[in-house]
Amino acid sequence: MSRAQLLALPTSGSAWTSLKAVADGSLGAPDLCDQDNKHDARTLAVALVYARTGQAAYFTKARDAIMSAIGTEQVGCHNAILSLGRQLGAYVLAADFITLSGTDETSFRAWLSDIRTRNLGGHSRWYVLRTTAGNSSNNWGTFALASMVAADL
């Protein structure tokens, strides 16, 4: 989505009200081992509100949330790659929407580079995001591929 397209979107109505309510609420704690965690989606909501409004408080909240996700992955946690695949793409999009920069961007990119090919275990067959994205046609592969595309871009 281009900046012009984003800025053309309304800041009123039920969709905006719902998005802003999520952005203004608690994000919870990041946990890349919990496949049902919603911190990633809530972080993306904050980033979208920042991108649309330019209000510094949303930038800070989104940046802090993105950076707090780094390191919450754990080798061997149950369904590690499904959890990572479901969440990673939202953090990548959030980083793009807020234009993450400086040492935060450097750290985030280094982590992204590593996490895509790291063996996280937790499943007998799907334990590396890149491999799962390329070799699985089920929901694991779909989530992994979406996150890989986002991270690769």
Image (spheres, rainbow, N blue to C red):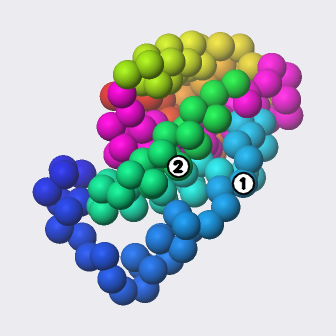
Residue closest to the eye, 41 or 77: 41
Residue at image point 19% right, 51% down: 3
Q: Position of residue 50 (x, y in %)?
A: 37, 56
Q: Position of residue 16 (x, y in %)?
A: 40, 76
The correct choice, above or below, for 103 with respect to 4 in the image is above
Residue at image point 75% right, 19% down: 120
The correct choice, above or below, for 20 with respect to 46 in the image is below
Q: Is residue 82 left or right of residue 15?
A: right
Count the marks: how many?
Answer: 2
Magenta stretch, residue numbers:
72-101
Residue at image point 58% right, 43% down: 65
83 is within the stretch colored magenta: yes
Circle 2 packing at 10 Å, graded few (<14), some (14-19), many (20+), is some
Which residue reaches farthest bottom?
13
Q: Which residue is mark 1?
A: 28
Q: Which quadrant of the figure has residue 9?
A: bottom left
Circle 1 packing at 10 Å, graded few (<14), some (14-19), many (20+), is few
Residue type marked 2 = Lys
Which one is earlier in the sequence, the residue at label 1 or at label 2?
1
Helix, strand or loop under label 1 = loop
Tag 1–tag 2 contact (CB < 8 Å): no
16 is within the stretch colored magenta: no
Q: Is residue 84 left or right of residue 29?
A: left
Q: Is residue 79 left or right of residue 113?
A: right
Residue at image point 30% right, 62% down: 53
Mark number displayed over residue 61? 2
Q: Position of residue 102 (x, y in %)?
A: 37, 22
Q: Quadrant of the C terminus?
A: top left
Helix, strand or loop under label 2 = helix
